[in-house]
Amino acid sequence: MGLDGEARGTQIHLRRPAALKKDGVDLREGDVVILNFALREFVQGADVHHRWVCRVQKLGVKVITVRPKGVIQKQTGLPVVLRDFSVSGACLQNSPLLETYLMGGERVPDDPTKLMSQLTGTGLLLSFYPRLFFQKDLAIYRPNIPPVIPVIGEIVRGGIDSGKDAGRLANYGVAFRFDPADYDPMTYDVQSWEPLRALRENSHFKEVHRALNGLLAYLER
């Protein structure tokens, strides 16, 4: 759900998402929902994502009224650039800040081969925030995925830059290893994970690929 509505005192009035009926979601008064939204920080030039845990107070035909259960929570962690993705992994753009983070504050080797040998096998907790706004004509190609996709990945390869930063690692190839299995009923954070075994793919990224294939076919007509 998104914050497409208005706040009056301690209540928030939301436009009822059409996807609720489409997805077969049966909301009831008293249910807990998590509102996910992003604010643009012009200084950083990037979106900063937030979430707000609320409880459904009243259900209407067009409007849902919710009451916050706590404070707005801001995203944590280090923002990185997603260069590419598949149903089983992602390519993350490297940066000096990311290198320092991955090395845990230790000195970053000048030799990219040595750096990659030290980082291979490193586990990463990733949170993907897909952009889900599609114009009316393209709304049918909007993938049916949540606003946040958490996954545990493992660095398995790196690409060396051949351009102006020749000799430096340009990106990291990360394989998806674990999907969420259960959530904490108090904090609503992931509390347990299940491994992606054999040829199993991440279901959300599989849905993104399905939607993108349809969109590309439409645009190439």
Image: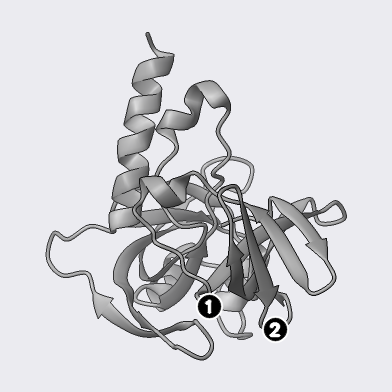
Q: How is the image coloured?
A: one colour
Q: Residue at x 55, y 74 (%)?
A: 109
Q: Residue at x 50, y 82 (%)?
A: 188
Tag 1 and tag 2, C-beta contact below 8 Å: no
In which quadrant will I find the N terminus?
A: bottom right
Q: Give the amino acid type for the residue marked by disc 2 in the picture.
A: Gly
Q: From the viewer's perspective, tell me whether residue 44 is left or right of residue 126.
A: right
Tell me where residue 89 appears, x and y as whole percent: 34, 57
Q: Residue at x 31, y 81 (%)?
A: 193
Q: Residue at x 33, y 30 (%)?
A: 213
As drawn, the residue found furthest toward the top would be: 221
Q: Image height check: is 124 above or below 157?
A: below
Tell me where residue 32 appears, x and y as whole percent: 52, 76
Quadrant of res 41: bottom right
* Marking on residue 66: none
Q: Give the amino acid type for the residue marked by disc 1 in the picture.
A: Gly
As drawn, the residue found furthest toward the bottom would be: 186
Tell me where residue 129 appears, x and y as whole percent: 55, 57
Q: Residues within 10 Å of mark 2 (few under 14, many from 20)?
A: few
* Marking on residue 30: 1
Q: Image height check: is 12 above or below 164?
A: below
In which quadrant will I find the C terminus?
A: top left
Depth check: 105 or 37 in front? 37
Q: Secondary structure at mark 2?
A: loop
Quadrant of res 113: bottom left
Depth check: 211 or 26 in front? 26
Q: Residues within 10 Å of mark 1 (few under 14, many from 20)?
A: few
Q: From the viewer's perspective, tell me whether residue 134 is left or right of residue 154.
A: right
Can residue 20 be seen here? The reply is yes
Q: Which residue is mark 2?
A: 70
Can residue 74 be seen here? The reply is no
